Image: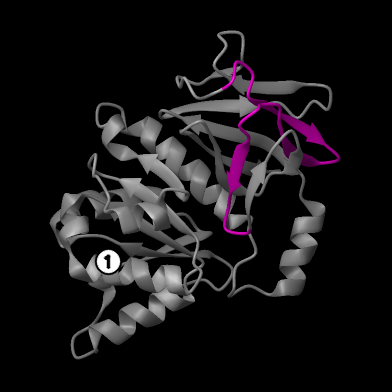
Amino acid sequence: MQSNALQVAVSYSHHDAACVITDIERLAKPNITFWIDRNITGGVVWREEIAQNFGAADLVMAFISDSWLDSEYCRQEISYALDHGKPILCVYIDDTQLTPGLQMSLNHRQTIARYQHTHNLDSYYNLADSALSAFTHKPGPSRNPAIATQMTTRMLPKALHLIYNSNQYDVTTSPNTRFTLGRSSECNLVLKSDFVSRVHGYVFFSQGKYHYQDTSSNGTQLLSNAKDLHLQQASSELATVGQIIMGGAIINYHTQGS
């Protein structure tokens, strides 16, 4: 694999191999390489090679299905990734109900519901491309920290994408614009939850960064690999990839760099 490429280790059930291989062949790019266990050669201790490749990966992409959930090996892979602090992108092949333990570990991770796009796979691929592109802008453990720091310093986000109920909403970078979220039909993103305030909060762009301001009485939770914050009438800078959670509604987001 290219040393400067985003290295993605794939966790999947062999029952879903045809679907997964089709996806990674479509999503692979010169700066994004995938490793799956079909690459293991004969005579190699497969468990050690899986651990080695998952340990070296910048990102783990889990293709979740009922078969994946039933696979002891898949659950070992995801446990290994969680123990080693790896970012995880969850792609749901089926409308799979996770166990309570996996819900605690994965519900705040970046998520794409592939099964909702079976009649329009291009829309799914666009979402996956955007999510993977966002991860390519995050410094990974295998990259040169000095180069990553220089790149991050130069790079200003040009787009923030919010994903709710499989719909994508783009936030402007205008410093005087607020993108509102709430129950009211007048909000930019309307959330269907009785536990969400009419205007629960808003996203704004300031000094080259995206921020979220909570305006509700119940507060908002911001989740990412770097932090877990509960905001009450307060604001915080948004991470590159994460989730905004309010009143049971979960909004995935990621910034796309220039």
Mark 1: which secondary structure?
helix
Circle 1 residue? 75
> In the picture, residue 101 is in which quadrant?
bottom left
251 is higher (above) or lower (below) than 17: above
Amino acid carrying mark 1 in the image: Arg
* Residue beneath the point at 77% across and 73% down: 146
* Residue beneath the point at 68% across and 44% down: 238
86 is higher (above) or lower (below) than 190: below
Farthest residue, direction right:
207
56 is higher (above) or lower (below) than 104: below
Q: Quadrant of the C terminus?
A: top right
For residue 220, side relative to residue 53 (left or right): right
178 is higher (above) or lower (below) than 49: above
Q: Nearer the viewer, residue 47 or 22?
A: 47
For residue 69, side relative to residue 190 (left or right): left
Q: Nearer the viewer, residue 244 or 34?
A: 244
Q: Is residue 218 highlighted in magenta?
A: yes
For residue 110, side relative to residue 230 (left or right): left
Q: From the top left corner, tell me how far across and down residue 18 is, in percent.
A: 18, 52
> In the picture, residue 60 is in which quadrant?
bottom left
Residue interval drawn in magenta:
197-226
Q: Is residue 254 visible?
A: yes
